């Protein structure tokens, strides 16, 4: 029998960056620098059943006032966020020795990122790994001179904030929540500590889509709009529709999202390694095939396949039939892979309807935002 699942399974925690990017999309002031965080926020909204913002109180002093309530401050999208934290189970506590082990791991990973040994850290080296609200606390307390000093008291002040942030991230993860964050420390946790999925579904889509857009876009556009953001913007006729469009997209994915999580939970809790391996291979195949399934190179491929078939047809009709069949099977392989999960099948279909970025950006963005994006 599989193990019991943690209490926050299927939920997301969104921090300051994605929330600010969503607000900028809804209310204006969107910049190219928002796009990465915006994509993270949209992933959270379509892949998880419940979404919470980072300011959080669990009865053990875990809190961070980096985001105010309501998070978006509109009449549609705010209702997609959980408000009553009193219904939320307490975060998982860490076992004896785990906090010390995490401290050592953090030192090793930060040392790699900073390029210094832990004994040579300065407060200015570590502040970049804190969330924005905690960075503000540090800069309000320490002077520029203090940030560059070697004094132990200043370094320990920043290290304690960093340690608290790391422990909170790990406790969220242990409780089953997916942390959607752009903070450098969260990125380190995702790479070395956290579960790969559901975010892993987008691992190959984003770079493939970005490379494709950079090749086809003309001069002038100064940023590549990521796929989920482009999908939302393609659905709009005016800016005022943003919040409702995101909410409707989230609702459209409810059934396939639930089915995806059923598969993930089967993989995580299965007693048989072969069963886990099969689901993992299907997930990896679906992830790798999202872009080619959404944007297949059909015309040239079929022309080549048909030509090879006709060359064989006169002499060996059976061989010609097999050649054409193999070609068609290869062409549809990506579609078959994404069809293994309703979520990826639905997403690949939606992605195929994305409009050109120049078109939807000019239609939705204010003039000042268009200038930010290089649309003269």
Image (tube, helix red, strand yellow):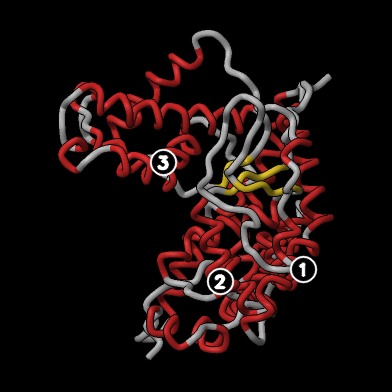
- The numbered mark at residue 289 is none
Q: For residue 250, what is the image quadrant?
A: bottom right
Q: Is residue 310 left or right of residue 164?
A: right
- Which residue matches tag 3? 134
- Which residue matches tag 1? 248
Picture residue at 72% right of the left edge, 39% below the top = 85
Picture residue at 47% right of the left edge, 40% below the top = 186
Does label 2 or label 3 sit earlier along the sequence?
Answer: 2
Does label 2 or label 1 sit earlier along the sequence?
Answer: 2
Residue 360 or residue 103, whichever sits in front = 103
Nearest to viewer (mark 3 / mark 1): 3
The crowding category of the residue bearing disc 3, from other C-alpha atoms within 10 Å (few below 14, some 14 to 19, many at least 20), is some
Residue 90 or residue 194, whichever sits in front = 90
Where disc 2 sits, the SS reads helix
Q: Position of residue 197 (x, y in %)?
A: 62, 42
- Residue at mark 3 to residue at mark 1: CA–CA distance: 34 Å
In this picture, is 326 found above or below 99?
A: below
The crowding category of the residue bearing disc 1, from other C-alpha atoms within 10 Å (few below 14, some 14 to 19, many at least 20), is some
């Amino acid at each position: 029998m599989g193990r019991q699942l943690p209490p926050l399974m299927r939920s997301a925690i969104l921090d300051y960056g994605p929330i600010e990017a969503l607000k900028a999309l809804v209310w204006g002031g969107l910049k190219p620098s928002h796009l990465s965080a915006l994509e993270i926020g949209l992933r959270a909204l379509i892949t998880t059943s419940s979404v919470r913002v980072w300011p959080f109180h669990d009865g053990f002093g875990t809190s961070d006032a980096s985001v105010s309530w309501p998070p978006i401050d509109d009449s549609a999208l705010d209702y997609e966020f959980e408000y009553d934290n009193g219904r939320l189970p307490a975060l998982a506590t860490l076992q004896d020795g785990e906090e010390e082990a995490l401290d050592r791991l953090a030192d090793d990973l930060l040392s790699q990122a900073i390029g210094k040994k832990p004994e040579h850290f300065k407060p200015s080296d570590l502040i970049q790994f804190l969330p924005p609200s905690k960075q503000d606390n540090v800069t309000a307390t320490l002077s520029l001179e203090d940030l560059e000093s070697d004094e132990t008291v200043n370094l320990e002040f920043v290290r304690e904030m960093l340690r608290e942030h790391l422990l909170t991230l790990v406790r969220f993860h242990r409780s089953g929540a997916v942390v959607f964050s752009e903070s450098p420390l969260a990125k380190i946790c995702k790479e070395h500590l956290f579960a790969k999925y559901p975010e892993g579904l987008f691992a190959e889509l984003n770079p493939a889509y970005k490379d494709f857009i950079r090749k086809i876009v003309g001069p002038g556009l100064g940023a590549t709009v990521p796929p989920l953001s482009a999908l939302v913007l393609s659905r709009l006729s005016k800016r005022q529709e943003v919040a409702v469009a995101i909410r409707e997209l989230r609702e459209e994915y409810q059934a396939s999202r639930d089915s995806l999580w059923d598969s993930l939970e089967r993989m995580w809790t299965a007693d048989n390694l072969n069963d886990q391996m099969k689901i993992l291979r299907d997930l990896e195949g679906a992830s790798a095939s999202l872009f080619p399934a959404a944007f297949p190179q059909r015309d040239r491929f079929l022309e080549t396949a048909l030509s090879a078939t006709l060359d064989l047809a006169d002499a060996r009709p059976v061989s010609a039939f097999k050649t054409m069949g193999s070609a068609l099977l290869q062409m549809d392989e990506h579609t078959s892979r994404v069809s293994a999960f309703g979520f990826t099948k639905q997403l690949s279909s939606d992605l195929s309807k994305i409009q050109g970025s120049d078109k939807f950006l000019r239609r939705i963005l204010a003039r000042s935002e268009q200038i930010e994006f290089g649309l003269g």
